[in-house]
Image: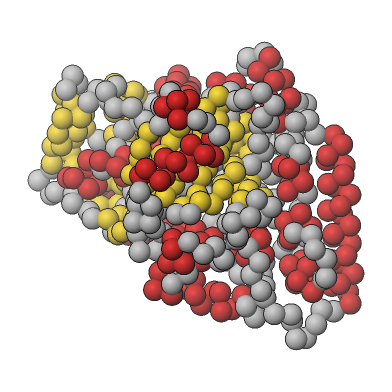
């Protein structure tokens, strides 16, 4: 039990495997006999799922920490710049109904709770357009930065839309060539157990037994290590999040269609449709509940959204995916930890899949045990933190559905109290009395701050009572000044930023590093 942890064996590639490998290798760079030996076993016979195409701004830190130049990433991974999410028809089935969850917080967030001032005002402007420039930047399809901006820097907070398949290959090449990760292109055929119940080695078709000290399961939904070998079960969350199926398709741009600066999510009778603008194509998918809609009706919704007749739609390669929501009972069992789809999946409403990979990999890297004896304590704390993280994301996603006023059975069922987590019901009771406050979600495992809740609550028309104590004149003055700053910054940025398409065209012709 005191044996040192020297080799980490990651089973499975894709985004999960290579992000994890890159973060581990960059933080524990191997020099001679010191550092960590990182090995990735990746089967050439298994394709990636390829639908995790939206990131959070955290990806900028992840890529920078691996030593990746942003320009190279943008050029090789079909990237466009994402400034948040746009939700259409979620409150009501009305073409004019939409709101934004931008990546930038409300102006002055952390200093003053500008939501209280907005709630007390009589204006008709939406919350996000009033307190942050990004809604108007996105509505104008503008980029968050200039061609001359330094890598990973911009005038507005941003993440990316990316080609998941190209991203995996790009990360693999970087990890192997720049970070010293060993790549074993082979198929796993079995697992060799140690006498104490740990995994000792992974058996492969061509390379025999490949040994390690810590094993990371990135085998996707198959979960060959954490699930099949160790028998760790899943906690289904289908009673909270109903969508369990997706129809995914890639389509080329039609003339005049802009590169959107946000992921567009359009509510449907039994779910919603994602629309992700990449550099050279769009990724579109219909997420729906099979208990509330037939596959045939779901196909019809997708075809109508695409504006295709039956013949043109039949020419598209539409993939059907099972996406039931749930996560592992524990994520780290003995000397094996699950990352990515092997750990679980929550429907892609707020693009949390890649963020969860980043978060998990960073936690492993930051708390890498030195010995097997230390691993049991590290894994216990890891499991506690990851469980809280998944629960928090689950609650935030459910909020979007619960606040809807749509009248189809799917949406009515989402408002039934029995489908609502108790903690979220408690929060809603609190927010009916007072707006979410900066610092309300200040724990290390909280990924959605109070600002995120404000954007969704007030985008969906949630009613918070006016503060019976009123607002102090000094705070009113500060809020007015902050809103004036938003208006000035919005006009300034609209006048200086290029369109997303124009910036990507400039990046595409820029010289390689």
Q: Is residue 361 visible?
A: no
- Residue drawn at (80%, 82%), measured in percent from left and top? 470
Q: Nearer the viewer, residue 351 or 27?
A: 351
Give x and y (percent) for residue 425. Answer: 49, 75
Q: Is residue 331 visible?
A: yes
In the displayed structure, does residue 495 sit left or right of residue 306? right
Above/below status of 404 relative to 43: below
In the displayed structure, does residue 114 sit left or right of residue 443? right
Give x and y (percent) for residue 362. Answer: 46, 45
Q: Quadrant of the C terminus?
A: top right
Q: How is the image coloured?
A: secondary structure
Point out the residue furthest to the left here.
195
Above/below status of 286 relative to 468: above
In the displayed structure, does residue 456 sit left or right of residue 113? left
Give x and y (percent) for residue 72. Answer: 59, 22
Which quarter of the picture shows residue 114?
Answer: bottom right
| Count of all numbered marks drawn on residues in the image | 0
Q: Nearer the viewer, residue 406 or 190?
A: 406
- Residue drawn at (52%, 31%), measured in percent from left and top? 308
Give x and y (percent) for residue 504. Answer: 68, 24
Point out the residue furthest to the bottom here.
468
In the displayed structure, does residue 27 sit left or right of residue 161? left
- Residue drawn at (44%, 47%), measured in percent from left and top? 287
Above/below status of 70 relative to 423: above
Which quarter of the picture shows residue 249?
Answer: top left
Q: Nearer the viewer, residue 125 or 295?
A: 295
Which quarter of the picture shows residue 202?
Answer: top left
Above/below status of 305 relative to 150: below
- Residue drawn at (88%, 74%), measured in percent from left and top? 474
């Amino acid at each position: 039990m005191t044996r040192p942890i020297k080799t980490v064996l990651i089973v499975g590639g894709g985004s999960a495997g290579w992000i994890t490998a890159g973060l581990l290798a960059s933080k524990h760079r191997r020099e001679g006999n010191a550092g960590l030996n990182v090995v990735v076993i990746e089967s050439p016979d298994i394709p990636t799922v390829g639908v995790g195409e939206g990131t959070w701004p955290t990806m900028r830190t992840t890529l920078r920490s691996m030593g990746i130049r942003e320009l190279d990433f943008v050029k090789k991974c079909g990237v466009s710049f994402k400034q948040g999410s746009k939700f259409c028809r979620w409150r009501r089935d009305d073409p004019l109904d939409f709101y934004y969850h931008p990546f930038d917080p409300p102006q002055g967030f952390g200093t003053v709770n500008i939501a209280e001032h907005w709630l007390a005002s009589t204006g008709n402007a939406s919350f996000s357009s009033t307190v942050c420039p990004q809604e108007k930047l996105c509505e104008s399809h503008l980029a968050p930065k200039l061609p001359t901006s330094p890598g990973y820097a911009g005038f507005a907070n941003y993440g990316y839309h990316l080609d998941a398949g190209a991203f995996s290959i790009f990360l693999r090449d970087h990890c192997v060539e720049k970070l010293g990760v060993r790549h074993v292109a082979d198929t796993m055929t079995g697992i060799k157990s140690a006498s104490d119940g740990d995994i000792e080695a992974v058996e492969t078709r061509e390379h025999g037994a490949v040994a390690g000290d810590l094993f990371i399961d990135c085998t996707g939904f198959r979960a060959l290590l954490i699930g099949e070998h160790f028998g760790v079960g899943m906690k289904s969350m289908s009673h909270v999040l109903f969508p369990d199926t997706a129809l995914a398709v890639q389509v080329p741009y039609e003339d005049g269609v802009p590169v959107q600066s946000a992921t567009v999510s359009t509510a449907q009778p039994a779910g919603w449709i994602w629309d992700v603008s990449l550099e050279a194509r769009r990724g579109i998918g219909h997420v729906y509940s099979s208990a509330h809609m037939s596959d045939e009706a779901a196909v019809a919704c997708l075809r109508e959204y695409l504006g295709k007749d039956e013949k043109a739609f039949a020419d598209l390669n539409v993939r059907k995916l099972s996406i039931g929501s749930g996560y592992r009972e524990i994520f780290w069992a003995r000397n094996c930890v699950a990352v990515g789809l092997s750990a679980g999946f929550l429907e892609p409403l707020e693009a949390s899949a890649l963020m969860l990979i980043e978060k998990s990999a960073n936690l492993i890297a930051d708390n890498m045990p030195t010995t097997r004896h230390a691993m049991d304590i590290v894994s216990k704390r890891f499991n506690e933190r990851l469980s809280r993280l998944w629960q928090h994301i689950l609650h935030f996603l459910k909020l979007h559905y619960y606040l809807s006023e749509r009248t189809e059975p799917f949406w009515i069922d989402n408002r039934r109290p029995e489908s609502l987590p108790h903690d979220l019901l408690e929060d809603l009771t609190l927010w009916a009395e007072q707006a979410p406050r900066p610092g309300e979600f200040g724990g290390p495992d909280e990924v959605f701050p109070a600002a995120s809740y404000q954007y969704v609550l007030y985008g969906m028309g949630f009613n918070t009572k006016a503060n019976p104590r009123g607002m102090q004149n000094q705070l009113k003055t500060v809020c007015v000044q902050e809103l004036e700053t938003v208006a000035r910054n919005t006009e300034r940025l609209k006048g200086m930023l290029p369109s997303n398409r124009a910036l990507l065209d400039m990046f595409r012709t820029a010289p390689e590093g």
